[in-house]
Amino acid sequence: MTGASAGAGATVPDRRGPARSPYLLPRQPDPTRAPLRLFCFHHAGGTASSFSGWQERLGGGVAVVPVQLPGREHRAKEPRLREFARLVDELDEALGPLLDAPHAFYGHSMGGIVAHELTRRRVERGLTPPRQLLVGACPPPHRPHPADGVPPEHRSDEELTAWMAGLGGLPDLVRRYPDWLRLAVAVLRDDLSLVHSHASGPGGATAPDPLPVPVRALAGSSDPLVTPGLAAEWARHTTADFRVFTLAGGHFFHRTAPGVVLRLVASLLAAEHSTRS
């Protein structure tokens, strides 16, 4: 349950502006030093530590920027957000100054919904969109989120614990300590409220217009929530190039097989960068 190192190298200067944003890790390496920035958005109940080790594996050509939502790890004392629109507003303001150079988004599960909505917001405002939108284990926007059938506030702690454990998203170490487990369930509940508020908010029931951004959908071969077939439906949400990839694993394949995922991500980023340079 502790935060992970953001990697070696020069860190973002301690000054006002985007470097001071709590959405960035405290020791975030300076992303302006790399030709491409990869912003990573974590899953419901997760943390920026989900992307621990990504910087080392992707190398110096890509600046990995894990995005930390409030109420966890170094932001544990902050209240968690339960309104999706407010989250996107804050991300747009906090990350905007760092999105003026070539960048891409990777979002896992709920993080994919966040990344897509932030992309849509920037396209609508005529701002620079990501060169690629990579979504892992994430249902397409025109489909309801598989976890959204019952409002989170109507689910007991036991139900949420069993649900997350069944997906492989609850480490045994957390389950052994009641205080850790209670915190993990509380974070999950509020994050699912974010998803629910997006689905029930304005436009949540209708499919948004497709984006002029290449989309890459990654799916776990044994994921019970987002099957490869469901992930393939992301094709209707882009007017640019679309590709879908099936990886061995379940809903959290980015944690169980990080090497495979990162080799794919690296190749996708490199291919896109070479076509633009």
Image: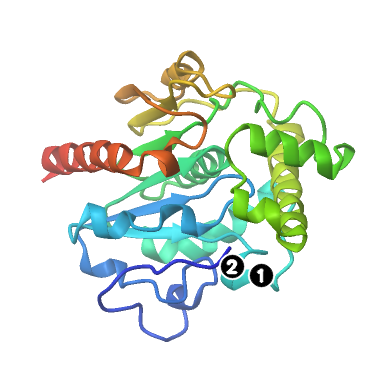
Amino acid at the residue labelled 1: Ala
* x, y percent for residue 191: 69, 48
Asked if one can make out residue 44 in the rendered structure from this viewpoint, the answer is: yes
Q: Residue at x 29, y 24 (%)?
A: 241
Residue 72: horizontal and vertical position, in percent? 63, 64
Q: How is the image coloured?
A: rainbow
Give me the residue at 43% from left, 21% from top.
Answer: 221
Q: Which mark is drawn over residue 73? A: 2
Horizontal side, residue 237 vs residue 132: left or right: right
Residue 176: give x, y in percent of width and height: 69, 55
- Left-right relation of 9 to 182: left
Helix, strand or loop status at disc 2:
helix
Q: Amino acid at mark 2?
A: Glu
How many labels were placed on the picture?
2
The residue that mark 1 highlights is 76
Rendering coords of residue 222 (x, y %): 49, 21
Above or below, 204 relative to 26: above
| Quadrant hosting residue 69 | bottom right
Q: Residue at x 47, y 83 (%)?
A: 16
Seen in the picture, residue 13 relative to 1 is either above or below; the reply is: below
Density class for disc 2 (Cα within 10 Å; few <14, some 14-19, many ≥20) is: some
Residue 27 in the figure: left or right of residue 200: left
Q: Quadrant of the N terminus?
A: bottom right
Relative to 275, residue 139 above or below: above
Nearer the observer, 276 or 254: 254
Query: Compared with residue 35, is residue 253 higher up or lower down, i.e. above or below?
Result: above
Q: Quadrant of residue 81?
A: bottom right
Label 2–label 1 contact, CB within 8 A: yes
Decide if residue 202 is in sight here: no
Q: In the figure, is residue 89 to the left or right of 227?
A: right
10 or 250, which is in the foreground? Answer: 250
Q: Could you tell me which residue is drawn at 60 percent across and 60 percent down?
A: 90
